[in-house]
Image (cartoon, helix red, strand yellow):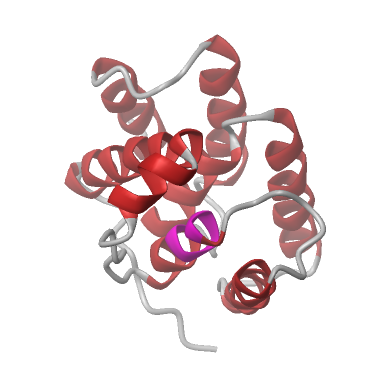
């Protein structure tokens, strides 16, 4: 069984999709990019986040298509963009409504580093929808980490 199939089964088994559309968007990303040279479990976690709604799904799809067209073998460009977006969100310069917490989480996933969840209690009061999304994504990350294979790897260029 392909790793992408195992992933879909595990996330479905743990009831981690919000609705059929979320599952469908995630499945589309996973089926298209799970065999890409830049794919990691961290990217898979970001795919779960981006599949939450159509707007973020379209952004992720554009980025992944560009990476494929440019024959990228690692996530360096995506990591750089994530750090810029996190800084913009923290300073209030970001045009969309994304929370800095979402960008911190995305960057932690991409860099295969722990997410600092110490601000979640405050976030639950100030922005319960974002706090809920982050908690669901962290649960999903734990499940993805337990699926054998597709280990996050350091890609040297």
In the image, which residues are magenta? 101-105
11, above or below 90, in the image: above
Q: Is residue 118 left or right of residue 50?
A: left
- The outermost residue toward the top is 20
154, above or below 45, in the image: below
Q: Write the residue at 69% across / 48% down.
A: 60
Q: Is residue 149 left or right of residue 89?
A: left
Q: Write the residue at 17% across / 44% down.
A: 146
In the image, residue 49 lies at what x, y percent?
51, 42
In the image, residue 130 lies at what x, y percent?
49, 41
- From the image, give the main secondary structure of the stretch colored magenta: helix
Q: Nearer the viewer, residue 101 or 44?
A: 101
> Which quadrant would the N terminus be assigned to in this image?
top left
Q: Is residue 71 left or right of residue 4?
A: right
108, above or below 96, in the image: below
Q: Write the residue at 29% across / 66% down.
A: 116
Q: Write the residue at 37% across / 54% down.
A: 41
Q: Determine if the magenta segment contains residue 103.
A: yes
* Quarter residue 54 falls in: top right
* Quarter residue 111 falls in: bottom left
Q: Nearer the viewer, residue 129 or 70?
A: 129
> Which quadrant would the C terminus be assigned to in this image?
bottom right
- The outermost residue toward the bottom is 157
In the image, residue 155 lies at what x, y percent?
45, 79
Q: Nearer the viewer, residue 12 or 155?
A: 12
Q: Determine if the magenta segment contains residue 136.
A: no
Q: Is residue 85 left or right of residue 142?
A: right
In the image, residue 131 lies at what x, y percent?
40, 42
């Amino acid at each position: 069984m392909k790793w992408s199939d195992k992933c879909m089964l595990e996330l479905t088994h743990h009831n981690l999709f919000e609705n059929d559309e979320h599952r469908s968007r995630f499945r589309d990303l996973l089926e298209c990019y799970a065999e890409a040279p830049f794919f990691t479990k961290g990217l898979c976690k970001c795919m779960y986040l981006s599949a939450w709604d159509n707007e973020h799904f379209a952004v992720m799809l554009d980025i992944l298509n560009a990476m494929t067209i440019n024959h990228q073998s690692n996530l360096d460009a995506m990591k750089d963009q994530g750090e810029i977006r996190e800084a913009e969100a923290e300073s209030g310069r970001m045009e969309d409504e994304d929370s800095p917490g979402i960008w911190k989480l995305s960057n932690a996933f991409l860099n295969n580093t722990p997410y600092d969840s110490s601000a979640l209690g405050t976030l639950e009061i100030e922005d319960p929808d974002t706090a809920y999304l982050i908690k669901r994504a962290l649960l999903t990350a734990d499940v993805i980490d337990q699926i054998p294979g597709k280990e996050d790897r350091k890609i040297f260029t």
